[in-house]
Amino acid sequence: MTKIGRYKLMNEKALVVGIGNQIRQDDGIGPYCVNLLKELLSPEKRELVDYLVVHQLDVIHCDLFSGYRLIVFIDADALSGSEPYRVEEIRPEPVSRPFTSHIGSIQDILSLTCRLYDSAPAGYLFAVRGLSFDVGEELTPEAICNSRKAVEAVKRLIDKFFPLA
């Protein structure tokens, strides 16, 4: 077990969380990226990464999240503009609004993880631009392209946190 400041970490691994509804076209970007990352990581890096695919986050995930050094969230976003994705560091903050078991931001979930388990994993959100959120199981070609670019950036982030000697 490792300690960073006053917070404990259960292991030296990353968790990649793909968030999305796979029957709403580009809303399935998160799960798609998780599967793509599994294919593209080197065998050495695969040993350092666990994966989770969910339709939405829930407070039940706090226990799981407390055991990781790094958590990368990948979700679809209806971004305007030409950027394929954006990256946001997520820092635990005091929960400022009423919290229910099914609604909460990534920041709220990490804040609750910190409060309940005395654990503060590093958190990053990769919001990948999607174009169509209609009913359907296929991602648009643009979403696939944007996902590939985001996954390359996720790989670089994992390399930063877990450099191999």
Image (cartoon, rainbow, N blue to C red):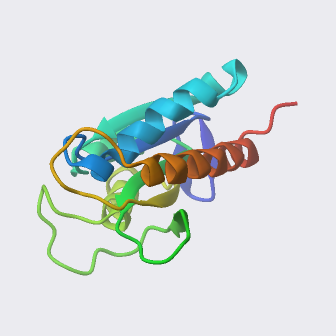
Nearest the viewer among 134 and 1 is 134
Relative to 85, is 161 on the left or the right?
right
Residue pictured at 39% horizontal, 46% vertical:
30
Residue pushed farthest front? 141
Residue pushed farthest bottom? 96
Q: Quadrant of the C terminus?
A: top right
Task: Evaluate whether residue 119 shows in this view.
Answer: no
Res 23 → quadrant: top left
Residue 137 higher or lower than 7, as above or below: above
Task: Evaluate whether residue 155 shows in this view.
Answer: yes
Residue pictured at 37% horizontal, 35% vertical:
52
Residue pictured at 26% horizontal, 81% vertical:
96
Q: Position of residue 128 (x, y in %)?
A: 46, 59
Q: Position of residue 18 (x, y in %)?
A: 38, 43
Residue pushed farthest top? 43
Res 46 → quadrant: top right
Q: How many marks?
A: 0
Q: Position of residue 16 (x, y in %)?
A: 47, 41
Q: Quadrant of the N terminus?
A: top right
Residue 71 higher or lower than 38, as above or below: below
Nearest the viewer among 18 and 32 is 32
Q: Position of residue 150 (x, y in %)?
A: 57, 52
